[in-house]
Amino acid sequence: MTDTQTAPYSGYFKRDVPAEDPELTHTGPGTACGEYLRRYWQPVAMSNEVSDLPVAIRILGEDLVLFRDKAGTLGLLHRHCAHRGASLEFGIIMDCGIKCCYHGWHFDVDGRLIDAPSEPLGSPVRDKVVQGAYPLHEVNGLVFAYMGPPDKKPDFPIYDTMNIEGTESKTFSLSMPANWLQVYENTQDPIHVIHLHALSSGVQFGAASGVEQLIDYRTTPLGMMNVQTRRVGDHLWTRTTDSIFPNGNQTGAIWEEAEGKKIFQRVSMLRWMVPIDNTHTLTIGWRYFSKELDPRGQDDPSLVGKETIDFIGQTAGRPYEEQQRQPGDYEVQVSQRPIAVHALEHRVTSDRGVSKLRGLLRDRVRAHDKTGEAPMPVLNEDSIVSTYCQDTVYPVAPVEDDEQLMKRFGGRVADTVLESDSLTAAKRIESIDKVCTKEFG
Ligand code: FES
Ligand SMILES: [Fe+2]
């Protein structure tokens, strides 16, 4: 008998669409993944979105309102007023806190009711009612919220790529009608760089990114990284791209051409894929600019901001024909369905990174669900968090078995990036340079 699933013209037998994988894709209050994500500081807006009016935002399926009171303190409150539910996005910003427009209830940034003006003096309501609120931390133009249990609030982590001398940063915020996981796992699917960003659409980033790469993966203390090694003329180029669990990611230079020696060049983006709800994702973070990252001057900071960034295929709004002729990350991620259905996939060798990322996340979600433990990053010699994304380019002449050489080079660079993580940046550069010179010079 013919197997209906593998026979040609078998569409009739493949019409059912099974449910998504809720363990990793559902992030609302009380879900296993949602509670795990809430244990970490999450970026929720750019500082420049918060002006003299409250901002309605939705994060992890919760409707919230973000504002800055006249004293300059940021507040993030549940959107619906504790009195009778009017939205605080229509509230009046006060010297201290915000006042609901409907009956004037006045809440502080921590949610405490300062005043209920039409209630008799001495009414117990002022002691009994508190509006839901979350703590915030503002850094370099981004506003982060902690939405987990108050007694578990971690210190805000300072990553080693957040303040690099000679590097300018600009914030960006891009939304997408797709589940957070398919946006996040794209960053551990490096083979798509060759297909989507080179063969399918024409080379969309630096020309060297269109050179086929050897790919490997490593678990890191923060999550995982992929290791991509390319032969570009007389140089070998190894890029490590890290996932900072649960939902952070860093990316190397967009326009890297691997033309000359560089050791441990840091990142062009530090960003987070934050669930707005189960079918929408906010990709928000910093885009970095420096001469080293962009020697040919192809970056355009003026295009970086709200729903806009300076490289193709990341946002809605392109003409449909252009989307079809030159699809980018936005088109593929949105078109995987609002929540990609894992049960329908045929994952293969080149999806190892996606499978690894899901596996590691699943372990963490389950462990958190069972024990309440969520691993926090450790600090390096500089008392900050070491990360693992970098580019190293080194002059190494091609040999007969070049693939073997590339493999060895990529492996040694990746291992050294990992092993040097307790050290300062300068010492990490030194150790990678030493390995390159000693073993490949
Ligand atoms: S609904 Fe907000 S004060 Fe009445
Ligand atoms: Fe991509």
Image (cartoon, rainbow, N blue to C red):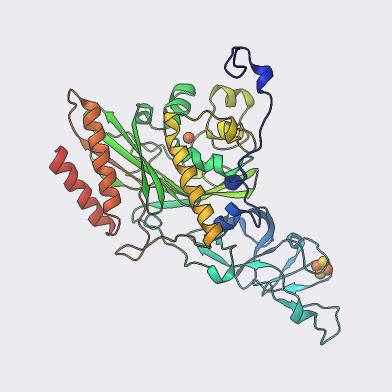
Reply above or below: 4 against 297.
above
Instruction: Specify the quadrant that holds the N terminus.
Output: top right
Is residue 262 something that shows in the picture?
no
Asked whether, in this view, residue 395 is left or right of residue 237, the answer is left
Q: State the residue at coordinates (38%, 27%).
A: 210
Q: Residue furthest front?
A: 1
Q: Position of residue 11 (x, y in %)?
A: 66, 17
Q: Position of residue 304 (x, y in %)?
A: 51, 45
Reply above or below: 361 against 236.
below
Q: Quadrant of residue 441?
A: top left
Q: Quick one: 33 or 377, which is closer to the camera?
A: 33
Q: State the residue at coordinates (18%, 22%).
A: 400
Is residue 378 something that shows in the picture?
yes
Q: Quick one: 354 or 413, which is closer to the camera?
A: 354
Q: Position of residue 32 (x, y in %)?
A: 59, 54
Q: State the residue at coordinates (41%, 56%).
A: 162
In this rendering, the count of numbered labels is: 0
Reply above or below: 10 against 122.
above
Q: Position of residue 432 (x, y in %)?
A: 22, 47
Reply above or below: 384 against 324.
below
Asked whether, in this view, residue 107 is left or right of residue 357, the answer is right
Q: State the residue at coordinates (42%, 29%).
A: 349
Q: Quick one: 418 or 101, which is closer to the camera?
A: 418
Asked whether, in this view, residue 135 is left or right of residue 360, the answer is right
